[in-house]
Image (cartoon, coloured by chain):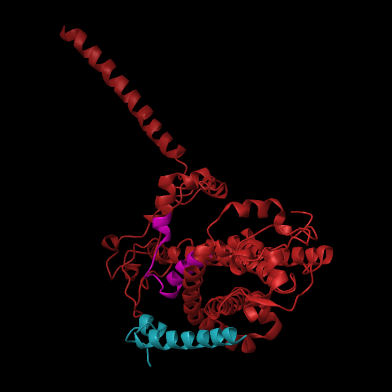
Amino acid sequence: MTVLRLPMLTILAALLLLAAPAAAQQGAGSEADSPRAATGGAQTLEDILARQRGERVDDRFRREAVGDPAQAAGIRMQLGTLGGASDAEVFRALRYGGADVTVSAKGHASEIIIQDGGMRWLEWRKGPLREWGGWLRGGVVGLLALFLLLRGPIRIDGGRTGETILRFNALERFGHWLLAGSFILLAISGLITLFGRPLLIPLLGKDAFAPIALASKWVHNNVAWAFMLAVVWVFVFWIVHNIPNRADLVWMAKGGGLFMRGSHPPARKFNAGQKIIFWVVVILGISISASGLSLLFPFELPMFAKTFEILNALGISQALGFGELPAQLSPHEEMQYAQLWHSIVAFVFIAIIIAHIYLGSIGMEGAFDAMESGEVDRQWAREHHSIWFEEETGEPAHPAHEAPPAAE
Amino acid sequence: MRAMLIAFLAMAVIAVAADLALDYSGFATAEVTAGPAVRN
């Protein structure tokens, strides 16, 4: 048995010796196959391509490579004064929030020196926001000009009678003009803020633009309070007149009579178009005020992480094709989302209000009187708000001897 | 027209009052963000 044991042990040892290099080779092979082997642990071509495809890249190789003071060379040794972290490692720690930072500025989030992702916001603000917003405004103005050209102003078909009826009392008009005046100032100052650098500085120069920018900031920050008060004001005064009813369906079906001469679908104090304007003003007004307050008091009123969380939970963001929205945001990201949302809502708001201003002024004869003196011509009231006219006066909007408008 | 002018006046008054009130309440940017190392 002893004679047999020795050769067997020899064979076993030989097998082990043969297997060991193979295992070692296998181990080395898996390391060699590691995607970061060729880059010494840094990012790979695959990382770059994945990022370009919009995929999430595991960036721990970078996030965690922030040096280690415990591994620092002795102070008398070569490179000892580096303290265990190279400049690149210090910047990585700052970028990913791992650095121990002391700043002399106070206020929220001042210890965040580098905000990863801030460039995405800046690029979006410089690019799509300005371009799409500009096209939206220009498009609305163009469409209205075309409408004015083709349709012309909407006249009082029956002619002015010279007799008037009170449409809006002084308090209603006060609320409307408080809202209108503040909205226009906020729109102009907001557009100066957004388009100042690419449009006004090349035109006026930096010295002339500086006081304009400062004035715009002051106006935007402080007139905002008048706007918020006015939104509440008009909501309280007009909500009762803006509940949708069946007459609105008829009005909508006839396009409000906007596209056909002599067509005057019946309406109460506010027609369906005006109700849409009312609800747009209330909803967008609340939304823009919320994001505006978040911007007025930086870092105090974060609201987007929570909103995204709710949208994710309800499946709304997924249904709209946005996928899972980030439910954890840095303080600066909160502000950036607030700024973008504020601007997007503002552009939509401006586009709609341009159409409202058109119809309330040059687009419709007699409409401006309602907000100037509060008194409108009785014939205007008969044609555009027949149900309201009958309720107010007790008279039929279309007397028996007059044929009702053909399109009704 | 009078309602419009009064509204515009009210807007100006609200804006100035808001600026003064926020400044007085310690919400001025300089007060919120500048540390003791910043000279006045």
Q: Residue A267's image quarter?
A: bottom right
Q: Residue at x 51, y 71 (%)?
A: A234
According to the colouring, which chain is cyan? B
Q: Nearer the viewer, residue A178 or A85?
A: A178
**Percent x, y of residue A270:** 60, 64
Q: Residue at x 28, y 16 (%)?
A: A11
Q: Which residues are magenta?
A: A284-307
Does any portion of residue A49 appear in the rendered image? Answer: yes
**Percent x, y of residue A350:** 62, 68
Q: Is residue A125 above or below residue A166?
A: above
In the image, farthest residue toward the left: A2
**Percent x, y of residue A34:** 44, 40
Q: Residue at x 77, y 75 (%)?
A: A160
Name the quadrant of the C terminus of chain A: bottom right
Q: Residue at x 46, y 71 (%)?
A: A232
According to the colouring, which chain is red? A
In the image, farthest residue toward the bottom: B40
Asked if residue A87 lies left or right of residue A400, the reply is left
Q: Main secondary structure of the magenta part?
A: helix
Name the quadrant of the N terminus of chain A: top left
Q: Nearer the viewer, residue A3 or A287?
A: A287
Asked if residue A386 lies left or right of residue A362, the reply is left
